[in-house]
Image (tube, rainbow, N blue to C red):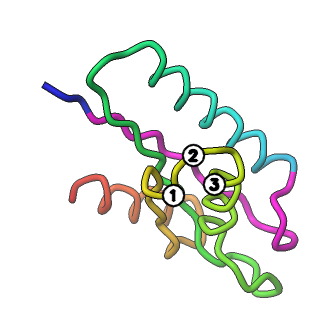
Amino acid sequence: MNETIVIVVLGNRLKSIDIHPELKGRMDTAISLYHELLNTKENIYVLLLLSGGISNQDVPISEAEVMRKYCVDNQIPEDKTIMENESLDTIGNAFFTRNIADS
């Protein structure tokens, strides 16, 4: 039987359309875990659930979109990512992420 593992990565308020050091640190940890799981377990399907909307009105892109771009730039296939881009804060991250995970 195949097992699905979902790695949830919470966003962090963007300062520009580029990933900043704190968010990059979260993403690097998630990407390392993604590869570690694929290399150490058999019959698994690993997804990255990227959570974060547009929390800074000066930046016209969601945190989840910036995180997905970072994933793709780091050899994570786009179809291995799920974007939650509605949340504006940590409570929203939890609420919307839970809705996606439950579905």
Whether label 1 touches label 3, CB < 8 Å:
yes
Whether label 2 touches label 3, CB < 8 Å:
yes
What number is the disc on residue 78?
A: 1
Corner quadrant of residue 62: bottom right
Looking at the picture, does residue 55 appear above or below residue 40?
A: below
Looking at the picture, does residue 3 appear above or below residue 96?
A: above
- Decide whether residue 16 is among the magenta residues: yes
Report the span colored magenta: 4-20
Corner quadrant of residue 43: top left
Residue shown at 45% from the left, 24% from the top: 38
Q: Nearer the viewer, residue 22 or 4?
A: 4
Secondary structure category for the residue under label 1? helix
Whether label 1 touches label 2, CB < 8 Å:
yes
Q: Which residue is mark 2?
A: 76
Residue shown at 65% from the left, 58% from the top: 67
Q: Position of residue 19 (x, y in %)?
A: 81, 59
- Decide whether residue 27 is among the magenta residues: no
Q: Nearer the viewer, residue 69 or 50?
A: 69
Q: Earlier in the sequence, mark 1 or mark 3?
A: 3
Q: Position of residue 94 (x, y in %)?
A: 44, 56
Q: CA distance from mark 2 to mark 3?
A: 5 Å
Please give left or right for residue 59 compared with residue 49 in the image: right
